Every structure is written in C-alpha cells, then in structure tokens.
Image (tube, rainbow, N blue to C red):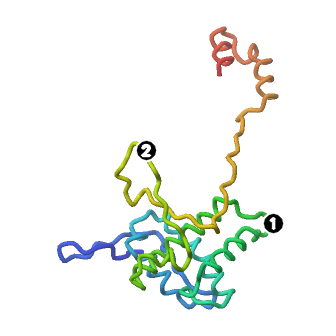
Amino acid sequence: VEIPNYLLDGKITYKKFSSFPYASYSSGTPCVIVNMYFYSSNIINLKELSIKRIAYCLSQLIKYCENKNIQIDEFDFNNFVDLSNSLQKEADENGKVRNNRTINNILKNIIYFYEFVGKTIFNDNDYVKIILKADINQLNFSNNKNVGDNNTYYSHPALVANNPARTRNPISKENINKIYDNIANLYQSSFGQERLKVL
C-alpha cells in the first residue's frame, strides 16, 4: 500500500506499507472519522506495527458504539467508563481476560483519537477534557524546568491500575542445586568448575 505522506517541491512523497488498517462497522460500512485519523500526521509516520495496534484499540471503540447503537461523536464520559468495565470483564475463547496494561493501552488510544476529533473536526482543544473528562498532567522533572508536550499524559478514572510487576528467577533453586552437584561431571578443569560456580 502506498499512501500520500507529504508534499515537497510540488511532488507528493508516498509512504509504503505491506498492509494498512481500514476501519469499518460490522456491515462493512467505513467508519470515516477513524479512517481519517489513520491517515493523519499523528499516525501515518508511525511504524506499521504501531499503526496496527492503534487500529486494534479503535476497533474496540467501534464495536462498543455499534453494540450501544450510538455514533462515534456521541461517545462520552459515561460510555468511556462503561467501555473500561466491559474490557475488564470480556474474556477470549479460552476464558482469559485482558491484563490491565492492554486495557489501558486501548483506553489511552481512544483518548488520543478523541483529541484528534476535538482539534480537527470541532476545532476544540479542550474536547477531551469536556466530553471525556480526561485530565492532562505533566511529568515533573525536578532538574528540568522546560518540560515539553512530550512529557504530558492523560489521566482518567476509567484507567485501571497497572498489574504488579512479577519477578522470576530464570533457574529454579532445585536446578541450581543440581548444577552444583554435577559441576565435577560438567567440567574437568578447575577453572571451568569455578567459572560455573560464579555463574
């Protein structure tokens, strides 16, 4: 797929993709505003895999709006909270539910989409704050007073707590003891044996 990217010296420069997402309802009708977002400068310059991930996140929004029989531009704070709850309960065919990081990724991409909608369609920079009641926060770096836009992020009550980090030992204690017991069999040289003990 070749998609127009920018105009330079009177020539259109194209960006090539092996495939590019297309947003539609279950009937096959295109979801115009989501497709506009895919072609926006916010998205078009990302890597192909990142664009596919965003497409997956926004497909959850389209599915929700279709099930609730509402238009994309009617989606509001209450719908956002309801969608968050649905994503937390929904399980795949194996009964496995999404982890919190995946849920937050979906919700954040929906916020970014509505930021685009607000600025592009409604010419409203506060659309996300007003409609979804999302707050814009800035990361506070004590040694850096010039915090730019890249250090801002959205917070929202519908976002879920991150899963606690899991720590794992790559080798179980039982297997470590087996290695110790067999060091003499694994290496004949004393250097090799000492090296394996250190490892």
Quickly name the residue at label 2: 142
SS at badge 1: loop
Q: Counting other residues with Cα less than 10 Å from the Cα at mark 2, is it few (<14), some (14-19), or many (20 or more)?
A: few
Q: CA distance from mark 2 to mark 1?
A: 45 Å
Q: Residue at x 53, y 88 (%)?
A: 30
Question: From the viewer's perspective, is residue 186 above or below residue 21?
Answer: above
Residue 80: x %, y % from top left: 63, 76
Quadrant placement of the C terminus:
top right
Ranked by sequence position, the earlier of labels 2 and 1 is: 1
For disc 1, the marked residue is 95
Quadrant position of residue 161: bottom right
The circle drawn on residue 184 is: none
Nearer to the camera, 10 or 59: 59
Q: Amino acid at mark 1?
A: Gly
Give the structural element (helix, strand or loop) at label 2: loop
For residue 133, which quarter of the picture? bottom right
Q: Amino acid at mark 2?
A: Ser
